[in-house]
Image (cartoon, grey):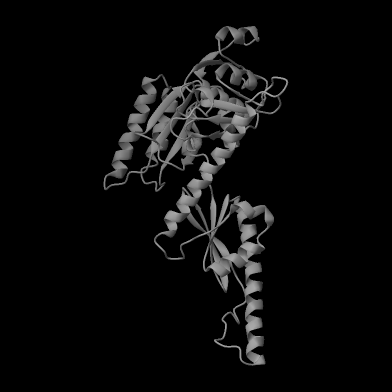
Amino acid sequence: MDLAFLHPLYEHPGPWASVYVDLSQRAEDTAHARELTAQAVARELASQGADDATCRAVREAVDELRHSTDPHGRALFAHGGRVVLDTPLARTPPGSTVAHWAPLPRVSPLLELAGEDPMCVVAYIDRKGADFELRSALGNRDAGGVTGRQWPVHRTTSSLDWSERHFQLRVENTWEHNAAEIADALAVCQEEAAADLVILVGDDRECRSVRERLPKRLAGRVVEAAHGTGSRLLDDEVLRVREQHVTERAQADLDRFLAARTPDGEGRAAAVEGVPALVEAAREHRIDELLMIPDGPDTHREVWIGEDADQLAVRRTELKTLGEQNSWSARADDALLRSAVMTGAPAISVTAALPPDTDDSPVGGMGALLRWK
């Protein structure tokens, strides 16, 4: 997950209000229920020590979601009397709407609620062209299409004389021309949308012709759907493809981590795990990618932070030794994610890749690949 969008959360010192709003439930009294939720969130933040201005800003922001059609929910982060970041969620928050007031924004739930939401370009292909649609957990939207040559596109039933064979050749040429145009337009659409996957829907021959003409850079991202346009099973198939992509990405990163944590001949490893080692790597700006199990046992472990992202330590006295006079207690996961954001490192939840009852996971639920040993 690219964490760059979280930069505004670290431009000002805390404390911060972090609210995860469930918008998945709908009924006749939804608007009234969400109004009550807004009031309850403000009361909860106030009970945790939030200032009146920030409580009011959050209450108003949640109240404005009374008629929202978001399918899952929103994450709101507020400080100093204003909502600094309002981001849609790709999955529904577990349980009811929750609110936190803490020195750092509570961002680690985003790894599973907003991260790794693969965008798909679904191409509905026929012999005359294709229509494109972008799909994600946030919904579907039209992405244009392409119209190829319209004639001739159908074969004759026989090829007994030269004129009919010539007509068949023109049909083949039309198909090839249209397939090339569809492939070119589809590649542009994928690149502009930064889509993770391309799903081809149509007859086997038409999809294969387009696939063969797509750029090599898309080779591992293209899937031919088993179900055609209008099938009730197509939506389920697209969802399965997206979920499989998330699992495969998490598995690949976890495998890299497991291999990298084995020391080399000089006793040095290219990965670390456990809070003390991660804190040290963060201080030295050595985290290349952060891996987390968001509900891991060490994610809520207490660490100490200063005003800057590289000012963190396992013990408060360590910060004073480093020359930091001001310090605050924070969760380990949120402190490490702040460091990752400010040094340009991505983060990923590897929960989807974990088989049951396995020890092949980062100790305590957190690990990191290093930029250098």
Residue toward you, 237 or 321: 237
Q: Is residue 348 visible?
A: yes
Residue at the right extreme of this rendering: 266
Residue at the front extreme of this rendering: 265
Where does the image place residue 200, in percent across and percent down from the top left?
54, 61
Tell whether 237 sits left or right of 38. right
Q: In which quadrant is the C terminus drawn?
A: top right
Write the residue at 58% across / 6% down. 317
Tell whether 205 sits left or right of 88. right
Where does the image place residue 79, in percent across and percent down from the top left?
50, 27
> Is 194 rendered above or below residue 5?
below
Q: How many marks?
A: 0
Q: In which quadrant is the N terminus drawn?
A: top right
> Is 277 rendered above or below residue 337?
above
Write the residue at 60% across / 31% down. 257
Residue toward you, 241 or 133: 241
Tell whether 261 sits left or right of 350. right
Write the residue at 60% across / 25% down. 339
Residue at the left extreme of this rendering: 28
Where does the image place residue 293, in percent across and percent down from the top left?
49, 30
> Is 264 rendered above or below residue 24?
above
Where does the image place residue 102, in percent across and percent down from the top left?
47, 21
> Is 227 rendered above or below residue 74?
below
Residue 216 position by quadrant: bottom right
Write the residue at 57% across / 88% down. 158
Residue toward you, 258 or 373: 258
